[in-house]
Amino acid sequence: MKKILNIFLAIAVLAVINTSCIKDLDTVPIDPDVVTAADVFDDPASYKQVLAKLYGGFAVSGQEGPSGQPDISGIDEGFGQYLRGLWYHQELTTDEAVIGWNDQTIKNFHGQSWGSSDVFIAAFYYRIFYQVAACNEFIRETADSKLDERGVTGQLREDIQYFRAEARLLRAISYWHAMDMFANVPFVTESDPVGAFFPQQIMRADLFQYVESELLEVEGLLKDPKANEYARADKASAWMLLAKLYLNAEVYSNSAMYDKAVEYSEKVVNSGYTLDPVYQNIFLADNHNSPEIIFPIAFDGLNTQTWGGNTFIIHAAVGGEMDPAKYGIDGGWGGTRTTSALVKTFYPDIEKGLMSISGHGKSINEYPVLHVPGSYQGWDPSNDSTVLASVNSDGNYEGYLNMDAGSEFKFTPQPDWSYDWGDNDADGSLDVGGANIQVAEAGYYKINVDTVAYTYTVLATQFGVIGDATAGGWDSDQNMTFDPATGMWTAVLDLVPGFVKFRANDDWAINYGDTGLDGILEADGDNIAIADAGTYTLTMKLGYPDYTYSIVRSAFDKRAMFFTEGQTLEIVDIGNFNDGYAIEKFKNITTDGATGSNLTFPDTDFPMFRLADAYLMYAEAVLRGGGGSQATALDLVNAIRTRAYGGETGGNITSADLTLDFILDERARELYWECHRRTDLVRYGKFTGGSYLWPWKGNVAGGSSTDGKFDIFPLPDGDVNANSNLQQNPGY
């Protein structure tokens, strides 16, 4: 089946949260009738249905779709969803994301200024342990003794062994999240009694050993790689998690285990999963077809409706001048953007020049216009593509029109023939009802009209690109080609770092630059900087003001999916969606351009584990002394970069380039917004402190040093106060 989650809705899971109960964030029973285990498992089909609920615990937040009968209470159900909580903790706390909303303490995440009473931290903490408790109960109820009591034999019993191994893997994932983010946490397993009690606290290093041992046991019990149903775990899922444990072992247990990280990431590399040929496809609505995704959190717009998950990730990233329809949704929430720090991992010199830009300009409806009917366009004054515009609304109109040889035309202030101007003497003066104005040659004409002085000019133009970034320098134009069908001037040029402008007729009388780097051209405007050498496609659309252009690198890193129109690079005001580039990575659009099944709730799955991550883990572990092959590490990294550059090798690196710092940046480029960044920065010693600053770290625009205590999150006050077995994490 495409998504196992489709079958679990309204299935009871007999789980009780085995942590301290607090009044503001209690768990609630899944089934309003509070059925017993015997009731549930009387039906043989229930085993798989309850397993589906365990998987669904990562995707949904309750029992009635986006809201109603939440799994945890005391907070908006969307905020209490697992993936949304994970994303907040792993992304909002880093250089990869900010959020503009004022919901309670949410902005404290990016500022690294949270405390132990933070409701969002508590929500994710309890969501983790809700998931652990649900897995515990399923594991308890599928023990051999229980199956013997129920007389479960044959194929069902064989299937249940796989189900049970998967449940242990899912529990291990949640305990990994608890260990990674909260360090020393309450510890419960299937061996503990059902009911309310105060669990003991386990130290991080001990929890590391437990999760490791569980994974080593279940890896042999899971189905082979790619042999399970989509969205269900297999051996490669266990190997991925083991590789992550070992790569971070120094953080978790103060013991380096990079050799093990090499071993298990290599197992994943050789498991049969393959890189998706197109990076974008990994994040679209039909990404269940991707050969790269090893373990997803599966979403379906009809069956897994939630205000968290990819509903949040996609909707919150759309705002400003972004068109929600292009992302397959019915509206943007205008919340999340990225910082310049992530942008600079792709474009280190972006402040010196452009890697890619496009302008949109204003609609003609936003300026007073003058119509130019003529033989070249069928003498139609209502044709709104053949107009001039007055950008200052002062009676001075300007624009460019393409005309055939011998074309005749006139000017009309309205889209009709009630009033018109021509020129009786062909002297550049306007006459009411005057003779047709004529051009002798075919060409692209710049036309200026002054309706106050009743004068006009018509000048044939041929455009080119000039500047020290071009082969001709500032002395020779590189000609552009005009396409009458699109109204675009185009040139494909090899450029070097430097500057360019657009000019007409090999002369400086008409030249355009971009003052403000907004993609809109101004006469005599600023030179346009090019930051990096490469082949670029330069386009320019004049017609009527605003004049717009684009400069796009032909061979570039296609993972840089930033929306920049109307957005600034730097964030002055986190609450303003237009401050900071928007992210276009996840979409509710299929590979063939169709929208998902629901415009509100996306079909797009979230790739928790995917192959490229294993490639990068292998390379990092090799560089950290874990053995393996540096040549293989380089090949794996370049395979990722070749995919990133659309199959071209222009972005490939050499062995000298392959450093730990490069890997950290490459992980950002490859895996941003996939809930890895905080863990990566902690491992590199760059999450807190002052060695690495990014905008608004520490609630300071330029970034500031933060306390090392923020490397882990606090246990919720309510839990610590209720359970005397728990000690708060240091510093909180």
Image (tube, grey):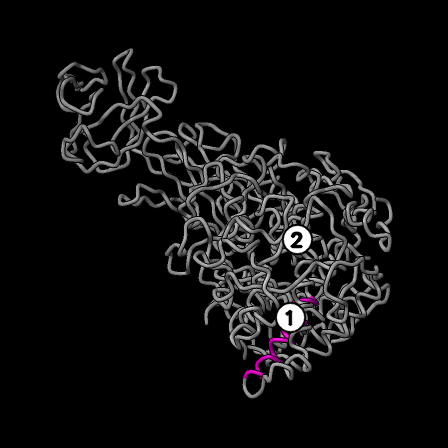
Q: Give the image location of residue 433, x and y in percent.
A: 13, 16
Q: Image quarter for residue 457?
A: top left
Q: On screen, 449 above or below 679?
A: above
Magenta region: 156-172
Looking at this view, name the residue that lies furthest to the top. 453
Specify the amino acid type for callout 1: Phe
Q: Which is nearer the eye, 279 or 247?
A: 247
Q: Which is nearer the eye, 295 or 168?
A: 168
Looking at this view, name the residue that lies furthest to the bottom. 154
Residue at 19% x, 29% y is 382
Q: Give the image location of residue 593, x and y in percent.
A: 38, 56
Residue tagged 1: 138
Q: Is 171 contained in the magenta span?
A: yes
- Which SS type dominates the magenta stretch? helix
Q: Which is nearer the eye, 3 or 673?
A: 3
Regarding mark 2 in the picture, which secondary structure is present there? loop
Q: On screen, 173 above or below 477?
A: below
The dot on residue 62 is: none
Q: Image quarter for residue 117?
A: top right
Specify the amino acid type for callout 2: Thr
Q: Is residue 451 left or right of residue 16?
A: left
Q: Is residue 75 left or right of residue 209?
A: left
Regarding mark 1 in the picture, which secondary structure is present there? helix
Q: Is 560 contained in the magenta span?
A: no
Residue tagged 2: 27
Mark positioned earlier in the residue sequence (2 or 1): 2
Residue at 32% x, 34% y is 543
Q: Which is nearer the eye, 13 or 522?
A: 13
The quarter of the picture where the C terminus appears is: top right
Res 284 visible: no
Res 421 visible: yes
Task: Determine crowd level at label 1: few under 14, some 14-19, many 20+ residues with C-alpha closer than 10 A.
Answer: many
